[in-house]
Amino acid sequence: MSLNPTAAEPLFTGVPVPDATLRSPPALLTGLRRGISRTCPACGQGKLFNGYLAVCPVCPVCGNDNEQYPSDDFGPYVTIFLVLHLMVPILVVADRTWDMSVWFEGAFAIPIFLLATLALLPFAKGGVIGFAWAFGVTRNQATDM
Ligand SMILES: [Zn+2]
């Protein structure tokens, strides 16, 4: 055993070392499935987010750089698209079925829109990151355009 810490022998720190061999080749359905389940798109085992929406910069399992995938605005766009397409038909049917005042509808609709948006946003952002991983879209490519 060498006493030189710069030697090739790794020091045991108790922290698991990321294993790049766990990464799978990019594929659209795999990326979307893993992203929507909020796991690393490359390995499907590491957490994609620290908390609600902050992306883990490096996957603790496979070491993939998950922060390189641009997901700034497209996740909210997807969320808005889904929430509106899910909620508007429900509101139209409720409006035609029951005779409610606009204030009464708004008192129910606005909190439901807000909760649905907040609930879907992390899954949509994960799906966008999985999509970007599948097609190899990175922040450097997005800014070069
Ligand atoms: Zn990973």
Image (cartoon, rainbow, N blue to C red):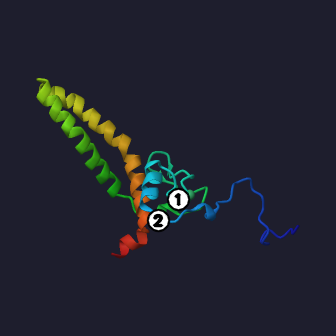
* Residue 121: image location, x then y, percent: 37, 46
Q: Establish whether ligand 1 lies closer than 8 Å to the Cβ of label 1.
A: no
- Badge 1 local density, few (<14 within 10 Å), some, or many (20+)? some
Task: Name the element at disc 2.
Answer: helix
In the rendered image, the vertical position of residue 141 relative to residue 69, given as above or below: below
Using the image as rendered, state which of residue 114 and residue 126 is in the foreground.
126
Which quadrant: the N terminus? bottom right
- Say which quarter of the image contains residue 137: bottom left
The residue labelled by disc 2 is: 68
Q: Residue type at mark 2: give it.
A: Gln
The answer for how far apart the CA atoms under marks 2 and 1 are is: 8 Å
Q: Quadrant of ligand 1?
A: bottom right
Extreme residue toward the bottom, this view: 144
Q: Could you tell me which residue is drawn at 87 percent across and 69 percent down?
A: 2
Residue 57's tag is: 1
- Say which quarter of the image contains residue 94: top left
Position of residue 4 in the picture relative to residue 133 (left or right): right
Q: Could you tell me which residue is drawn at 75 percent across and 56 percent down?
A: 13
Q: Is residue 102 visible?
A: no
* Residue 38: image location, x then y, percent: 47, 49
- Earlier along the polypeptide chain: callout 2 or callout 1? 1
CB of mark 2 within 8 Å of CB of mark 1? Answer: no
Position of residue 101 in the picture relative to residue 29 (left or right): left
Q: Could you tell me which residue is drawn at 33 percent across and 57 percent down?
A: 74
Count of numbered badges drawn on the protein: 2
Q: Residue type at mark 1: give it.
A: Pro
- Say which quarter of the image contains residue 85: top left
